[in-house]
Amino acid sequence: MQSFNLTITILMSLVFCSCDLFSTRTPANPDTSQNSLQPATSQEILIQNFKTSIEIKNTDGYLICFADTNRKTKNFQFVASSNGLSLFAGLFDKWTNLDERRYINNLFSNISQEIKPLVDLKTIEKSDFPDSSIYLINYKLSINLIGKSIPSYYNGQMQFTIVNNNSGQWFIQRWLDLGSQSNDTLQSNSWSILKGKFYN
């Protein structure tokens, strides 16, 4: 009986040792995508959050960049480029935060999970006022879309009016898309066109 118990004990020890049941495993890398968005306590952080939220496809992080009355600011306003207005007549007349949400959700759902959009923003001019700042920005946006015959490259200039609320947070209150000055149709897809195509 003792030899039987000894055999069982040895066998159990071998099983536990061979399967590494009690060994520690290497911890998984933390998800840094959410942590890369910081409270927009400066204008520069706000613009970086805007860029990063698109690259990591974070809808909530993107939408919090925009002003609204819940954040004790005036509501967000989007003014489309001339080619966006001509292609999507009436769409941008009363564009709201809800329209922005609808567009960005549609866009993100049409980008493959492993694909990262590329966003290049270059500030070329900044004007400061007592309660706001206006940034003139060159933009380039590259997006690979799933099974869509839609251009993947957009570029032009935009103007952000950035405001501060009582809690020291900065928000985009007005976005004026100036589009591209290029006559080349391959280089003249403005951000407004992207919004129009992904509104529905």
Image (cartoon, rainbow, N blue to C red):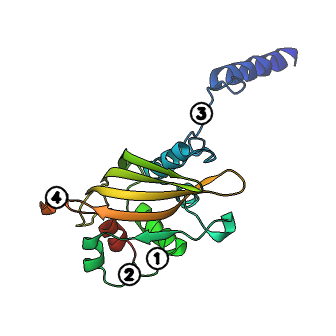
| Secondary structure category for the residue under label 2 | loop
Q: Residues within 10 Å of mark 4 (few under 14, many from 20)?
A: few
Measured in 3D between alpha carbons, the distance from the residue under mark 1 to the one under mark 2, in whole angstroms, is 7 Å
Circles 1 and 2: CB atoms closer than 8 Å: yes
Q: Residues within 10 Å of mark 3 (few under 14, many from 20)?
A: few
Which residue lies at the image location 57% right of the left edge and 39% below the top edge? 32
Q: In the structure shown, which secondary structural element does the residue marked by tag 1 occupy? A: loop
Name the residue that disc number 4 marks.
182
Nearest to N terminus: mark 4 or mark 2: 2
The kind of residue on which mark 2 rests is: Leu
Disc tally is 4
Residue projecting furthest to the right: 2
Closer to us: 5 or 121 = 121
Asked whether the residues under the numbered discs 3 and 2 touch, taking CB atoms below 8 Å apart as contact, a structural biologist would say: no
Instruction: Report the amino acid beneath label 3.
Output: Ala
Q: CA distance from mark 4 to mark 1?
A: 26 Å
Report which residue position mark 3 lands on.
28
Nearer the N terminus, badge 3 or badge 1? 3
Please name which of the two marks, 3 or 2, marks the residue nearer to the observer. 2
